[in-house]
Image: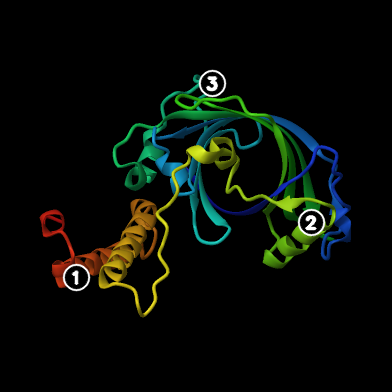
Amino acid sequence: MGRFSEIERKFDADAGTALPDLCTVDRVAAVTEPIETRLEATYFDTRDLRLAAHRSTLRCRLGGADEGWHLKLPAGGEQRTELRLPLDAADRAPRTVPEELVKEVRGLIRGHELIPVAVLHTTRLERRLLDADGNDLAHVADDAVHAARLGAGSADLSGWREVEVELAGGDQELLEAVSAALEAAGLTRSPAASKLARTLGELVPEQAVRPKLTPRSRAAQVVVAHLREQVDELISHDPGARADKPDAVHKMRVATRRLRSALATYRPLLDRARTDPI
């Protein structure tokens, strides 16, 4: 299984909006001719969309150079960790997620079944931004997307167009420069974290709102905020621990110790019938 670090940014674009000449961006010496690819992706999640709620996506995609299974997990800011598995040549319509990927998200799905929740058909025109030596700086994908939800709440959606900028050999400064050029041409930053998030829309559960704490906040609010923060820490480092990522187990243990200490110290503020067993 391949493991990659990914930084990409999405933009919404009207059908008639032309992309700017990105050769005007500093350090971009050439832009390749677009290559068209047709992609079909089936996205998997639990019935209550636990992966989507944690800004994670799991798909099986047909078409393209990286055809196969893709799991994307947030890694802070705009960075994501992507895990890839090749598709079994004998199974072109898989309905069961490989156990290697189930293991990676077990901390999020908590034993719930992963089922198909959406299918996306994308026609992609991809260009590569090159430096003076011909090295890849970034890939710019101009996508025409048509999506459909599956299962409960299913609905055919009208298509949309979006442009993705993914860094290759370039850095954050290049990403900002390309973004500025696209926005000057009339494109806008997409509010959706992924194509799936846009497809599911209001079906994705909202994360619990974090209250703004002040010196006047009640003690219970402060304790609950601290407990929630440590639970989030525990879950966020779970995939890294399963992948034997350096320091992930240590960080999970730190979060666990802090949880244990808080549950013991603030017993008078908590429902002990629920917290003492923990």
Between disc 2 and disc 3, whose residue precedes? 3
Residue that numbered label 2 is attached to: 183
> Dot 3: few (<14), some (14–19), or many (≥20) neighbours within 10 Å?
few
Front in this rendered view, residue 228 or 180: 228
Q: Nearer the viewer, mark 3 or mark 1?
A: 1
> Dot 1: few (<14), some (14–19), or many (≥20) neighbours within 10 Å?
few
Q: Which amino acid type corresponds to the residue marked 3 in the rendered image?
A: Arg
- Residue 40, given in percent of the width and then of the height, sits at 62, 28
Residue that numbered label 3 is attached to: 92
**In this view, 150 is above or below 233:** above
Q: Which residue is found at the position 18% from the left and 67% from the top? A: 269
Between disc 1 and disc 2, whose residue precedes? 2
Left or right relative to 71: residue 135: right
The answer to which image quadrant residue 215 occupies is: bottom left
Q: Which residue is found at the position 52% from the left and 40% from the top? A: 202
Left or right relative to 130: residue 259: left
- Residue 25, given in percent of the width and then of the height, sits at 84, 62
